[in-house]
Image: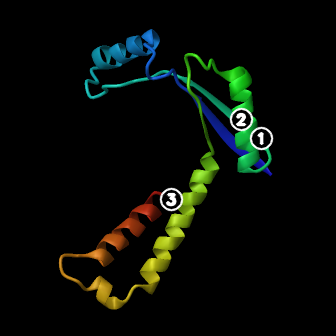
Amino acid sequence: MKTKTILLVPPRAAIRHPESEVILKAVRHNLGLKEVIQLTKGTFFQMEIEGSEEEARQIATRATQQLLHNPITQDFSVHFPEGAQGELAHLRRVLAQIKSEATPQAFESPATSFGGKLSRICELISQAGL
């Protein structure tokens, strides 16, 4: 089993990062995007690892700790994009099941209650293709 793995390696929050400051200034002033109040430039690694998510987490953590980041100036985190998609698919199934099992009274309460909101959530999830 191959597991897609993403490693994010940002600078530690407590450490001043001049490159991020320069980029933030350019985004705010040169592009006029004053709404951007924080920006951190980090490093991104994408790996495909043979094994389960747990095995991939261990391998990615080892690679990052031993080679891919500086523990004095950088943090890191391991993510699984397909794992997140699996969670969204599961949420979609659960919401569909709740909707199918809900009593008609749940959909008839005043002020477009639970039923209307649940229907809207299911609609949005479907529209997003999740």
Q: Is residue 39 above or below residue 108?
A: above
Q: Which residue is mark 2?
A: 60
Percent of width and height locating residue 97: 49, 78
Name the residue type under label 3: Gly
Name the residue type under label 2: Ala
Q: Quick one: label 1 or label 2, which is nearer the N terminus?
A: 1
Residue 24: quadrant of the picture: top left
Of 34 and 67, which appears nearest the observer? 67
Q: Is residue 129 above or below residue 107?
A: above
Percent of width and height locating residue 20: 43, 16
Cα gap from disc 2 to disc 3, whole angstroms: 30 Å
Name the residue type under label 1: Ile
Residue at 52 percent of width and 59 percent of height: 130
Q: Which residue is mark 3?
A: 129
For this view, does 73 lie left or right of residue 67?
A: left
Residue at 46 percent of width and 11 percent of height: 19
Of 28 and 57, which appears nearest the observer? 57
Secondary element at tag 3: loop
Q: Which residue is mark 1?
A: 49
Residue that lies at the very extreme toward the left in this rendered image: 111
Image mark count: 3
Residue at 58 percent of width and 16 percent of height: 72
Q: Quick one: label 1 or label 3, which is nearer the N terminus?
A: 1
Cα gap from disc 1 to disc 2, whole angstroms: 8 Å
Is label 2 in contact with label 3 (beta carbons under 8 Å)?
A: no
Q: Is residue 123 above or below residue 101?
A: above
Nearest to viewer (mark 1 / mark 3): 1
